[in-house]
Amino acid sequence: MNSLKNKNNFSISDLYSFLYNAFGPQGWWPADTKFEVIVGAILTQNTSWKNVEKSIKNLKLKNLLDFNVIYNLSVEVLANEIKSSGFYRQKANRLKSLVYSIHSNYGSLENFLNQEVNEARKFLLSIKGIGKETADSIILYAMDKPVFVVDSYTLRIFKRIGFDLRDYETIKMQIEKNFNYNTENLKEFHALLVELAKRYCKKSPSCDTCPINHFCEKNI
């Protein structure tokens, strides 16, 4: 497969292999249902996953983590149940808007999940508060469609490694082509980048112990 390379002849495919060997399979996104993935994608905006887990656990305990239940739930009640995720009123409104729009446009969650990538992405981006990262997370992990999620971790890592990719859509397109639009590989690569960023490639990086430090632009 053709891969983008940095100045040290290090490709995206090389990066995937090194990270997979270092960390193993990630099994991301952790969820019991497709709808749980959608909820998590919205709740994780501007907060840590640990805070999202608390909200999801609370919704499950109260039997609220269901498309039809949330459709009929008031924004006020929903906001109260997801407080641990931060910006909870805003996120409750976004989640309610998404559920309502899915119901209005497709009739059911199942019908929405069966949409093609371009249709689903256009629809999701039309919902206030849902940007490219959230939309692509839903498409990749809930719909099992071959898109790549370009998050802040990806941008940070790619800049340090020296891949000459300048914007969200360019990075997304190149990585999707690099993995031949293989959904499982795109999921795994995104998850591995997240793990690298959390362990080593932080805002203040731990380069000495990083498994790819010899390929990083900082060391070229």
Image (cartoon, grey):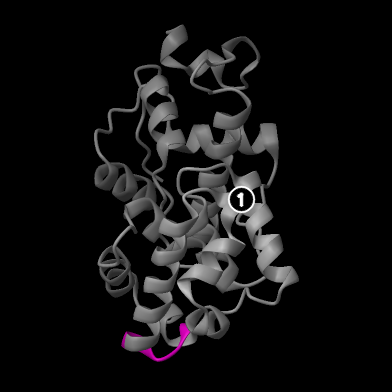
Vertical placement of 9 versus 170: above or below?
above
217 horizontally vs 129: left or right:
right
Q: Nearer the viewer, residue 142 or 102?
A: 102
Q: Which residue is drawn at 40% across and 91% down?
A: 107
**Lateral position of residue 188 relative to residue 217, left or right:** right
Q: Based on the picture, tell me whether residue 27 belongs to the magenta stretch.
A: no
Which of the two residues, 171 or 197, is positioned nearer the viewer here?
197
Residue at coordinates 70% horizontally, 41% vertically from top-left?
24
The residue that disc 1 covers is: 84
Q: Residue at x 60, y 46 (%)?
A: 49
106 relative to 200, above or below: below
Of the residues shown, which amino acid type is indicated by label 1? Ser
Question: In this picture, is 18 found above or below 50?
Answer: above
Secondary structure that dominates the magenta span: helix
The one nearer the camera, 124 or 51, is 51
Location of residue 115 by image quarter: bottom left
* Viewport quadrant of the C terminus: top left
Q: Residue at x 45, y 88 (%)?
A: 108
Q: Position of residue 146 (x, y in %)?
A: 42, 62
Residue 32 placement: quadrant:
bottom right
Residue 86 position, x and y percent, is 52, 48
Residue 108 falls within the magenta-colored stretch: yes
| Position of residue 139 measured from the top left corner of the image (x, y, whole percent) | 43, 65
Determine the secondary structure under disc 1: helix
What range of the chain is rendered magenta? 105-109
- Looking at this view, name the residue that lies furthest to the bottom: 107
Q: Position of residue 74 (x, y in %)?
A: 49, 76
Instruction: State which quadrant residue 174 falls in.
Output: top left
Residue at the extreme right: 61
Q: How many marks?
A: 1
